[in-house]
Image (cartoon, rainbow, N blue to C red):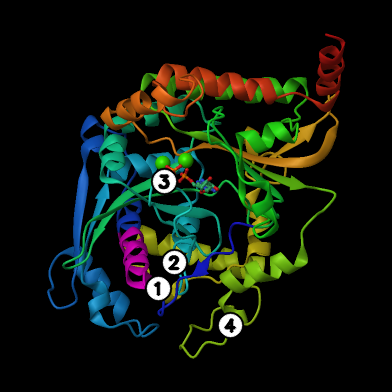
Amino acid sequence: RVLVGTKVDESHANWVTAYNMLTGIRVSVSRTNAKLDRELTDADFEAKQKSTFDMCVSSPAANEQTLTMASTGNELVPSAKYDFKFKDYAPWVFRRLRALFRLDPADYLMSLTGKYILSELGSPGKSGSFFYFSRDYKYIIKTIHHSEHKFMRKILKDYYTHVQQNPNTLLSQFYGLHRVKMPYGKKIHFVVMNNLFPPHRDIHTTFDLKGSTVGRDYKEEDLKQNPRATLKDLNWLRRKRHLELGIQKKRLFLEQLRADVLLLKRLQIMDYSLLVGIHDVSRGNDENLRDKTLQVFNPSREKSTDEDPPVGLQRTPSKLETARKARELRQMIRQERPIPMGQAIDKMPDVLGVGHSRPGFVFNQDDGGFQATHENNDPADEIYYLGVIDCLTHYGIIKKIEHFWKGLSSDRTQISALPPDQYGDRFYNFVEGITMSSEEAQREEIRREEE
Ligand code: ATP
Ligand code: CA
Ligand code: CA
């Protein structure tokens, strides 16, 4: 499973960066959520709020909070760790977005709090972005390029309106846009978004589909070494796979995808893909992998010499404890009290499983995902975890050049860099073409043979 990343602890090269990211998020999110809700204004989409975290200087609100946090005694952190600048972009818009995606503010904060908070996935794509999972595996922090950051701010209003009108959008759910800067360091932009894959289910196969065939192949022989690698379009086609959805689910899925792609085309976005994680119900969860997961995310399994807070560390906290803790946190938010690091609840993936099936969201209705169905709507043996990811690439000058050069040597319609309209059509048509129940696929196969 992809999640077995490297745990980011004190010995990790990016520990300070990760720690500062989380501290910044925690302070800025609790600050915004502490205020009385209000309607958004145009200015909210352009807003940015700067905080300076520096133990030696005292006066702005953020400094006070940091000082309080450091003096709770739950952690012994050298002051240097707090020496950074943090920017929170459009905090009110993201507060609203989190509400639209039905995240509980206290829950969000708890997920992004804790001692060994993140696990790093390194840089899986070519872009150089880093991915970090929150310890409970619900959220992903992705570092993004400055151009993606600028672009995201530009399209934020369109994105927001789209989410309002399409609560079941398949597009990445963005929960925050931030920037962190350490002394002498460069500015790091990042987004917080949903992890499409659930904490409580193994994903047996993953595909990243663009509808392009040039270079969209993961070497099958490499799969032996890396059985959970992300496969691509050609692997999908070679395996004669289908997104097996019966009539009703197919309609729901394609209608939403069509609306989402329409927005991406309008905003001149390209290079996105449909991420498909497949849980094979007949295989269930592989216990070994599950154990590994827990090691990454559950500090109680590790020898720790730190003075960890005693909260539920030796065992899974009961539902009651979790609820009580959440209540306390909510109260802290209401009273604008800072939330110290040590207040993290050590929630384990199995506890989280309960909350992960997100009621009310069409594509998360079956165990957090969307179960394959037969033509008559009977459930089939797979659960899909689906979404459109990497949707911040504007078809700017770089892509135009790439399209020109690559087009000289390959079939122009098959390469991945296409103008957004063509990209979107090709993408949609590809996905539509592979979405059919097993019965439909069989009929198709017979028809083809007869031709
Ligand atoms: P590139 O631009 O080279 O494609 P990137 O750095 O922009 O790469 P993405 O395409 O966003 O990266 O993601 C790379 C991989 O990370 C995906 O193929 C997928 O395996 C994983 N991933 C990305 N976003 C998510 C998500 N929201 N949930 C689960 N996995 C994700
Ligand atoms: Ca990508
Ligand atoms: Ca990208």
Say which residue label 3 marks.
175
Front residue of this view, candidates 257 and 25: 257
Q: CA distance from mark 4 to mark 1?
A: 19 Å
Task: State yes or no: discs 2 and 3 in contact (Cβ < 8 Å).
Answer: no
Using a 10 Å C-alpha cutoff, classify the residue at mark 4 as few (fewer than 14 neighbours), some (14 to 19) or many (20 or more): few
Which quadrant holds the C terminus?
A: top right
Q: How many marks?
A: 4
Front residue of this view, candidates 305 and 17: 17
Sequence order check, earlier mark of 3 and 1: 3
Q: Position of residue 273 (x, y in %)?
A: 52, 34
The amino acid pointed to by label 3 is Tyr
Q: Which residues are magenta?
A: 13-27
> Which circle, 3 or 1, is nearer the viewer?
3
Q: Is residue 37 left or right of residue 56?
A: right
Q: Is residue 254 left or right of residue 91?
A: right
Sequence order check, earlier mark of 2 and 3: 2
Q: CA distance from mark 3 to mark 1?
A: 20 Å
Q: Residue furthest top?
A: 451
Q: Under tag 3, what secondary structure?
A: strand
Chief secondary structure of the magenta span?
Answer: helix
Q: Residue furthest bottom?
A: 305
**Is any atom of residue 154 visible in this view?**
yes
Say which quarter of the image contains residue 322.
Answer: bottom right
The amino acid pointed to by label 4 is Glu
> Which circle, 3 or 4, is nearer the viewer?
4
Sequence order check, earlier mark of 3 and 4: 3
Say which residue label 2 marks.
113
Q: Residue at x 25, y 39 (%)?
A: 150
Sequence order check, earlier mark of 4 and 2: 2
Q: Under tag 1, what secondary structure?
A: helix
